[in-house]
Image (cartoon, rainbow, N blue to C red):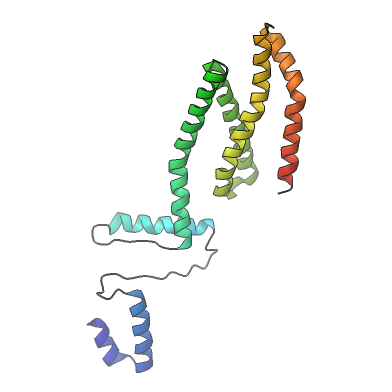
């Protein structure tokens, strides 16, 4: 009804047709839904859009949830939902899966839970150092979310792989009857060159990226 009055009395024919076209595109047939288009003056894929989307959702959630169903829809909004879901659901699954797998394999391979805990400590220290250094290097700009998702499994795999070289050699020497001190020193000496070479190969490979 509002549109018909506006159309017939106050708006020239061409403008009314344009108005009707825009309204019909943004409003449902039964006038039960309306779409509001927002054109950002900033980089749509930047951090500002992330905060803007969250602010809009918080605003409507705090005031209008009892009378309106509000959906913020865009590529950035969808990406934000994906990132938020990943950082809420994935870390517990990743931590639980890694801890369970390492403890289980260490118990069967070395018949020791303490070795599994030692391997997990090595992984934890590595990730703290890497992500802490990256945080200091990038400062307030932060780290792109995809880097964390990709880097975490790679670091876990590499850390476990190289540490297993060392632990396996030490374990073999202890099984042969050598003392703990000799097994650690000799195991480090014998596997150190292999671990260092493998590490250098990975550094060169990733530098190419």
Q: Which sits in the foreground, 95 or 73? A: 95
Tally the marks: 0
Residue 167 screen position, x and y as percent: 64, 20
Where 75 falls versus 105 (above or below)? below
In the depicted view, which residue is nearer to us: 138 or 125?
A: 125
Eyeballing the image, is 169 above or below 15?
Answer: above
Q: Residue 177: percent from the left, percent from the top? A: 67, 6
Relative side of 158 to 188, left or right: left
Task: Point out the residue furthest to the left here.
Answer: 1
Which quadrant holds residue 7? bottom left
Residue that appears at 75% across and 27% down = 194
The residue at the point 72 percent across, 34 percent down is: 199
Residue 18 percent coordinates (x, y)? 38, 86
Farthest bottom residue? 13
Could you tell me which quadrant the N terminus lies in? bottom left
Q: Position of residue 155 (x, y in %)?
A: 61, 36
Q: Is residue 101 left or right of residue 201?
A: left
Residue at 61 percent across and 45 percent down: it is 139
Residue visible at 39% across and 59% down? 56
Is 155 positioned to the left or the right of 102 in the image? right
């Amino acid at each position: 009804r509002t549109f018909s009055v506006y159309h017939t009395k106050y708006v020239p024919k061409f403008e009314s047709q344009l108005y009707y076209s825009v309204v019909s595109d943004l409003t449902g047939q039964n006038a039960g839904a309306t779409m509001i288009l927002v054109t950002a003056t900033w980089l749509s894929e930047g951090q500002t859009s992330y905060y803007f989307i969250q602010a809009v959702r918080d605003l409507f959630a705090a005031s209008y949830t009892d009378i309106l169903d509000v959906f913020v829809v865009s590529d950035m909004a969808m990406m934000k939902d994906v990132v938020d879901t990943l950082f809420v659901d994935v870390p517990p699954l990743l931590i639980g899966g890694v801890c369970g797998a390492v403890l289980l394999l260490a118990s069967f391979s070395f018949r020791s839970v303490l070795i599994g805990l030692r391997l997990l400590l090595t992984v934890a220290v590595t990730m703290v150092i890497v992500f802490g250094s990256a945080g200091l290097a990038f400062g307030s700009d932060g780290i792109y979310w995809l880097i964390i998702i990709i880097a975490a499994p790679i670091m876990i795999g590499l850390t476990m792989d190289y540490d297993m070289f060392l632990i396996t050699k030490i374990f073999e020497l202890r099984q042969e009857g050598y003392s703990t001190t000799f097994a650690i020193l000799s195991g480090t000496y014998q596997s150190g060159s292999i671990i260092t070479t493998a590490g250098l190969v990975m550094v060169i490979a990733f530098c190419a990226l």
